[in-house]
């Protein structure tokens, strides 16, 4: 009897041992597979539900309002239609970078420095001092040129009497678009150092012809009397840079085919202020819907009215506003582009972080 009981016990132990091994193996496989699926599920959830970024820190504090030029009455009376490809305003994030800009400072060497710059542009005679920051030089050959320069930031304008000289209306001597842009940048760079955010830009050209006492856009190169060149600051993270009229660059020039060399640049303006690209912070944005309401209410800035009293807006972007005057910060703007050349701007920063924000603006 004892032998039979012992045999039965051993059989049971073997059975239960096999069952334990079997179910244990199944449990291990389930745990491995389950862990794999759980890890995949957690990773998927994390990827599709990322944690909210920290709130914009706005370390510069409240910003000065963008100093747009004064609006005219006909700009205020425009009506607006939204005709984007989707029929809706495009989505934008809740924040954008604001960059510190470098301010110019007086220098004891300013007088000597600007005279050296002027000599590089062919103006070697003693200048006239117009005010505490502006000098004017004049030369009369080969035509009359005037150069006015800010002795503190080296920004300048160069003008001439080219429109009163018909011999300069010469399309056959005009350079190509690329040659004209490079000629202008080379000329400016001979007196002041071009920063990479301008030096790397190719420039935008336009053909011009004489019309009455002024200039109009020509239909083609063969119909042109001059080439206009505009060089803008390089985009920042795919956001374009816009100036007050939407079309004039920080470097703006007119090139003639009737003169050679540097004298062919018969009109030139240089308005550049350095951006400290390494010194920035994130600021909250007002919604694009709010910006659209502000524009419709006549409180936005119209850079170009276009050809109609009804602005049909086709595209909306987030860009940056580049003032020809010195500004403390490079700030983002909502840009509305429409038919007939319409260009409108609305400041993009949340008005709660703008100094002396207009109380009439839609929040």
Image: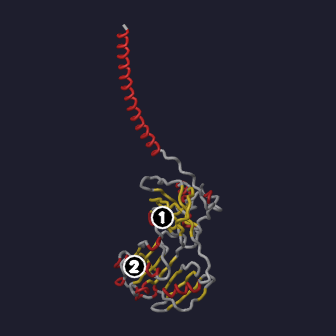
**Image mark count:** 2
Q: Name the N-terminal-most of marks 2 and 1.
A: 2
In this view of the protein, can residue 58 be seen by the observer? yes
Element type at marker 1? loop
Q: Nearer the viewer, residue 226 or 285?
A: 285
Q: Position of residue 201 (x, y in %)?
A: 43, 71
Residue highlighted by disc 1: 236
Which residue corresponds to the image point at 50% horizontal and 59% vertical from the top-left?
A: 80
Q: Position of residue 252 (x, y in %)?
A: 47, 76
Which residue corresponds to the image point at 39% horizontal and 87% vertical from the top-left?
A: 258
The quadrant where residue 280 appears: bottom right
In-image side of 59 versus 255 (left or right): right
Q: Is residue 49 above or below residue 85?
A: above
Residue highlighted by disc 2: 180
Q: Position of residue 30 (x, y in %)?
A: 39, 31
Q: Is residue 184 above or below residue 334?
A: below
Asked if the residue under mark 1 is in contact with the one under mark 2, i.e. CB atoms within 8 Å, the reply is: no
């Amino acid at each position: 009897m004892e032998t039979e009981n012992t045999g039965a016990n051993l059989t049971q132990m073997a059975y239960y041992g096999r069952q334990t091994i079997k179910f244990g193996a199944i449990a291990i496989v389930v745990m491995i597979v389950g862990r794999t699926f759980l890890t995949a599920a957690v990773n998927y959830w994390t990827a599709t539900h990322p944690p909210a970024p920290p709130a914009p820190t706005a370390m510069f504090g409240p910003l000065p309002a963008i100093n747009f030029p004064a609006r005219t009455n006909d700009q205020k009376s425009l009506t607006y239609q939204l005709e984007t490809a989707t029929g809706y305003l495009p989505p934008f994030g809740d924040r954008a970078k604001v960059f510190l800009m470098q301010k110019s400072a007086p220098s004891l060497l300013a007088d000597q420095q600007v005279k050296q710059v002027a000599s590089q542009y062919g103006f070697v005679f003693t200048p006239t001092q117009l005010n505490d920051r502006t000098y004017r030089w004049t030369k009369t050959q080969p035509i009359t040129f005037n150069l006015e320069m800010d002795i503190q930031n080296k920004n300048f304008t160069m003008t001439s009497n080219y429109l009163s000289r018909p011999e300069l209306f010469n399309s056959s001597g005009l350079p190509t678009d690329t040659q004209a842009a490079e000629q202008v940048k080379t000329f400016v760079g001979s007196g002041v150092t071009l920063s990479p955010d301008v030096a790397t830009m190719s420039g935008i050209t336009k053909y011009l012809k004489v019309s009455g006492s002024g200039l109009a856009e020509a239909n083609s190169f063969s119909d042109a009397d001059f080439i206009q060149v505009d060089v803008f600051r390089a985009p920042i993270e795919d956001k374009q840079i816009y100036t007050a009229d939407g079309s004039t660059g920080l470097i703006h020039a007119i090139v003639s085919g009737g003169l050679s060399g540097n004298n062919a640049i018969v009109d030139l303006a240089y308005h550049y202020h350095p951006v400290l690209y390494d010194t920035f912070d994130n600021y909250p944005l007002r919604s694009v819907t709010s910006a659209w309401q502000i524009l419709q209410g006549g409180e936005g800035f119209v850079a170009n009215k276009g050809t109609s009293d009804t602005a049909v807006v086709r595209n909306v972007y987030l860009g940056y506003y580049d003032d020809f005057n010195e500004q403390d910060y490079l700030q983002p703007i909502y840009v509305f582009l429409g038919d007939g050349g319409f260009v409108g701007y609305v400041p993009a920063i949340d008005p709660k972080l703008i100094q002396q924000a207009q109380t009439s603006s839609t929040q």
